[in-house]
Image: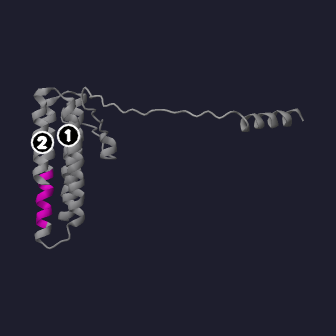
Amino acid sequence: MLNFVLVFLATLSILFAPSVTVNAKNTITATPSPSPIIKKVNSYELFWPITAGRVMSDQLYFLKSLKEQLREMFIFSDIKKAEYNVTLSEKRTVEAEKLFLINQDYSYGKQSLDVAQAKREKAQNLLMEAQEKGRNVIDLNNIMVSSFERQIELLSYIETQVPEEQKSVLSESIDKINSLL
């Protein structure tokens, strides 16, 4: 019974409490930002499920490369081979991220970007061959455009994180991707 009376009194006090109105004046003032905010790019989310794993500076990297070459030999469709090369270009780009940002091994990072570009160009050539054969390449073209745009996004982020003397390597790689788009 006591609980009932307390709840009843609390309800009455809320209902009949004096109302308070607040007159607030909203003022928006523009303050200049000292530097643009750089959005961190997560390569794992961008290229899921690709991770860097072994990179060119690792001693056993040649095994990874050999496995990929053997796998490609057993892909006979030009469209599937092009898709595989797009995936390899993504892998090399993610490896370049690890080399540039974590290992700070800029020489191998550049080599990884060069291999990624070669894979992108091979995929582009395979797309052209399939198109000349009259094959439907719309899906492949969409895959390539999407992948290349995501690679540009990652490389643009990496470019903001490296020392000034390395920025030209990344901007050159971005320009090469844009030329394929």
Outermost residue to the bottom: 134
User: Which amino acid type is marked by label 1?
Assistant: Leu
Tell me if residue 60 is in the magenta stretch.
no
Label total for image = 2
- The residue labelled by disc 1 is 155
Quarter of the image for residue 145 reads bottom left
Q: Taking 165 as reference, is 128 above or below it?
A: below
The quarter of the rendered structure image containing the C terminus is: bottom left
Q: Is residue 85 above or below residue 58?
A: below
Q: Amino acid at mark 2?
A: Ser
Quick check: is 124 in the magenta stretch?
yes
Give the extent of the magenta segment.
Answer: 120-129
Q: Which residue is mark 2?
A: 173
Badge 1 vs badge 2, beta-carbon distance below 8 Å:
yes
Element class at badge 1: helix
Lower sequence index among marks 1 and 2: 1
